Image (cartoon, rainbow, N blue to C red):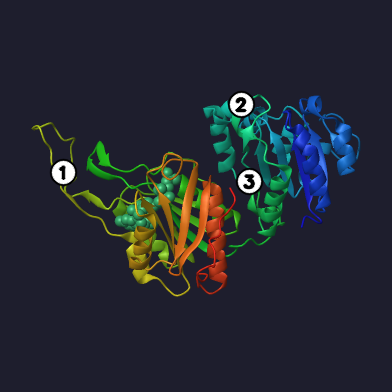
Amino acid sequence: MLQGKSILLGVTGGIAAYKAAALCSKLKQEGAEVHVIMTASATQFISELTFQTLSRQPVYTDTFDERDPSVVSHIDLADHADLVLVAPATANVIAKMAHGLADDMLTTTLLATTAPVMVAPAMNVHMYAHPAVVHNMDILRSRGVRFIEPEEGLLACGYTGKGRLAEPEHIVEYVKRWFAEGGGESALRPAGAASQGRERPGLLQGKRVLITAGGTIERIDPVRYITNDSSGKMGFAVAEAARDMGACVTVIAGQTQSVPPEGVELIRVETALDMRDAVIARYVDADIVVKAAAVADYRPVHRAAHKLKKTGERLVIELERNPDILQELGEKKKKNQLLIGFAAETEQLEQYALDKLARKNLDYIVANDVSRTDAGFGSERNEVHIYSKNGLVERIPLTAKSEVARRLLQIAAQAISAGGEPPSLPDEVHSLEP
Ligand code: PMT
C-alpha cells in the first residue's frame, strides 16, 4: 500500500518513542521509504541506531549536521516527503508547530515542508486535556494538520486515561487508508501550498460540497437574541474532510466560536432567513449538501429597534415559524444532488430521524443524541447513526467529529458514484472502530 511513498517520521521525546521503532518498521514493511528525524529528547529514550537499522537510512537529529554538501538536509527532507508523520508528538512539539518555532532539526523541517502533516500525540492525560494543548491542536487542525488520536489506558506516568500513543498498527492503518482515499499529496498540504504541481485526485475531486455549520441567532432587540448550543465543530469537520477529499467547499456558518478550516469558502450569516438565502443561492451548483447547522425553528415576530426596557413582571415574546431550509432543498432537489441532513434529538432518535429523512426528502440523515455531554453540541466528539431511506446505513460509535465527517463523506462519495442510490439495507450494522 505504501510502495513508493516517502514518509518523514518525526520522533519526539516521550516514553512512547520506543513505539516509534515498531511504527518505523511497519511502515517499511508496507513498502514506504522512511526517513527519521529525532529530537534531542527522543534520543534520551531510544537510540538513533535503532531507527537507522530499521529504516536503512541515516537518522537526523542536528540541523547543523550537514552530511551531503550538495543539499541542505532539512530542506531536502522537507521537499521529498509525501507525508510528515510526527509520532509520538509531545505537548512541546505541538506547541512549537502551532506557533512556528524552529529551534531544532524536526521543527525546522516542519516549517520548510509543504507535505501533508499528521500528528500522533502522546502525553499525560491532564496535559492532553490542558486548554493550551487543546488550543494548539485546534490551531494546527485549522491549518490542515491531521491528528491520530491517542488511545485510552494505563499511561507510563501511572495515570489511566487518554494520552497513550495510538498503537503503531493503528497509525499505519490510518496512513494507508488516507493514501488509499487519495488524501496523498494534495489533501493535507497547508493552504496556499497546494500548487506544487503534485496534486492527486481525491474521493470528491471536482465535486461541489455545500455545508452549513453553527447555530442561527434570532434577535429580540439589538443586544438580545435566541440561539442554541451549536459550536459549528461538526459542520467545520465535514468541511475540512470534504476539502481533504478534493472537493470545492462552501460553508455557510451561523454563530460559532470555532476556527473554520482554511481552504474553503466561508460565508457568515446570522439568522435562519439569512442562512436560507445563502444556501438557496448556492444550491443549484452543489453536488452534495450537508446541513449540520442548528437552525432556529422560530424567530421573534417583532425585533425591537432599541433595547427593550423592563416593563412588568412578565414579558411575552411572540415567535413565528422560520422556513425549513432543508425541506425546501428536498423539494427542489435534482436527481444528481445528494442531500444530507442532521437530526439533533434527545429521545426516540431513530423514529424522529427517519421521519425527518422522509419528510424532507433526504438521501441520508445523521442522527445524534444531543442530551449527552460527551457528544453532540460543543463536544470534539460525536456518536451518530446514519440512515438512508433503506434504514440504518452505519452506526459510528463515539469518536472524533473529524472521523464522523470523513466516514459520512465516504458514504456520500460512494453514493454519488453509484448514481445517488443509497446502499441497500445491510445484513448487519456496520460500525467504525473509534
Ligand atoms: O455544532 P456542534 O456543536 O458541533 O454540534 C453539532 C450538532 C449537534 C449541531 C449537529 O451534529 C446537528 O445535529 N445538527 C443539526 C441540528 C438541528 O437543527 O437538528 P434538527 O433536528 O432540529 O433539524 C433537522 C435538520 O433540518 C438539520 O439538518 C437542520 O440543519 C435542518 N433545519 C432545521 C430547521 C430549519 N428551520 N431549517 C433547517 O434546514
**Dot 1: element:** loop
Pointer 1 local density, CA inside 10 Å: few below 14, some 14–19, many at least 20: few
**Foreground: 293 or 198?**
293
- Say which of marks 3 and 2 sits in front: 2
Q: Which mark is residue 317?
A: 1
Q: Marks 3 and 2, Cα distance to the nearest angstrom?
A: 35 Å
Q: Which residue is mark 3?
A: 190
At 64% from the left and 43% from the top, the residue drawn is 148
Is there any visible trace of residue 341 in the rendered image? yes
Which residue sits furthest left? 312
In the figure, is residue 169 to the left or right of 138? right
Question: Which quarter of the rendered picture does the N terminus lie within?
Answer: bottom right
What's under tag 1, amino acid-wise? Ile
Q: Quadrant of residue 221?
A: top left
Q: Is residue 142 above or below residue 429?
A: above
Q: Are marks 2 and 1 in contact (CB under 8 Å)?
A: no
Is the residue marked 2 within 8 Å of ligand 1, measured from its CB? no
Q: Amino acid at mark 2?
A: Tyr
Image position of 5 with respect to 381: above or below: below
Q: CA distance from mark 1 to mark 3?
A: 47 Å
Picture residue at 80% right of the left edge, 36% below the top? 37
Q: Is mark 1 within 8 Å of ligand 1?
A: no
Return the disc, 1 or 3, that comes first in the chain's sequence: 3
